[in-house]
Amino acid sequence: MRVALATQAAPGRPNEDFAGATPGAAVLLDGVGTPTGSDSGCAHGVPWYVQALGSTLLAGMNQSEGSLTEVLADGIKAVASMHDFACDLSHPGSPSATVVMLRRTAHAIDWLVLADSVLVLDVIGAAEPMVICDDREAQVGERYRKAMDALAADTVEHVAAHRAYVENLRDHRNRDGGFWVAAVDPLAADQALTGTVPAENVRAAALLSDGASRLVDRFELATWRQALDLLDESGPDELIRRVREAEAGDLDGARWPRGKTFDDATAIYWTFS
Ligand SMILES: [Zn+2]
């Protein structure tokens, strides 16, 4: 097996994505940032949260034989206990993150996806890759994003509309009928999409934050098949380079309206055979 990994923060900001891998497991998180002018009950911040949760999940996947749902629930609980005595974790802006987990056991590959990071499995013999994404946040977001998308990016008005969008979404976070992310409540783990596939059926897997998957699912500059081939031939840093090139060619968001002109972009490419 071989794992390649690349991550790049949006220019001028700390990276709020996390990626890590061991010979038997991989994890990718995309932290939900606090927009300028918004507050959060946590003194540690989003980069701290994704690093704490990501490394806890990686250890859990290697040390526990429980399901990935159990590993995630235990991880959320463990990280909450690292700061619940110091921070206000009931604050709606407390740090949260998307989660993709992948574990290789003797004969199978277990996967888990929570919120809008993407897992792509290159299934042997299948015409199209298997793409797993939890789009509940995007469905809720549809209701609120019109005002933001109509404004040119990098304007004061767009920054304000993005902040309003993020704050509107908070009211739907970890609620029935809304969307679910890793934050403080371990019950969010039960809402993750999960599955197991026989190891011999999978050639490779890609774990992508939405800042990397946007090459395919927002910009439509490649198919999932082409993205896997690119990762295989040129590696995750080339995929991120192409995302940055597209973003730089559409600074005002006229072609591809989006909340963030540049986003943290992270990709793990794991080849099994
Ligand atoms: Zn904190």
Image (cartoon, rainbow, N blue to C red):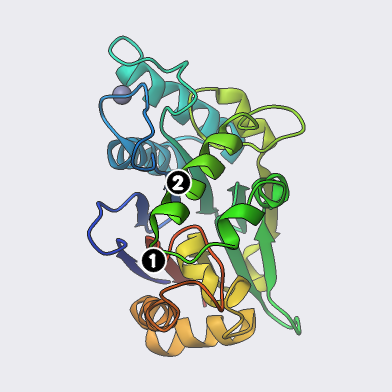
- For this orientation, the residue located farthest to the bottom is 233
For the residue pair 26 and 140, the one nearer the viewer reads as 140
Q: Are marks 1 and 2 in contact (CB under 8 Å)?
A: no
Q: How many marks?
A: 2
Q: Which mark is residue 160?
A: 2
Location of residue 225 with respect to 86 vertically, above or below: below
- Taking the image in four quarters, ligand 1 sits in the one at top left
Question: Where is residue 257 shown, x and y percent of the image?
Answer: 56, 68
- Identify the residue at horizontal 54%, vertical 53% (top origin): 105
Q: Amino acid at mark 2?
A: Ala
The residue to which callout 1 is attached is 262
Residue 84 drawn above or below residue 96: above
The amino acid marked with disc number 1 is: Phe
Q: Residues within 10 Å of mark 2 (few under 14, many from 20)?
A: some
Residue found farthest to the top: 85
Of residues 177 and 58, the one drawn nearer to the viewer in this rendering: 177
Local SS, label 2: helix
As drawn, 70 above or below 194:
above
Residue 145 is labelled as: none
Q: Residues within 10 Å of mark 1 (few under 14, many from 20)?
A: some
The picture places residue 273, in percent across and down from the top left corner, at 52, 78
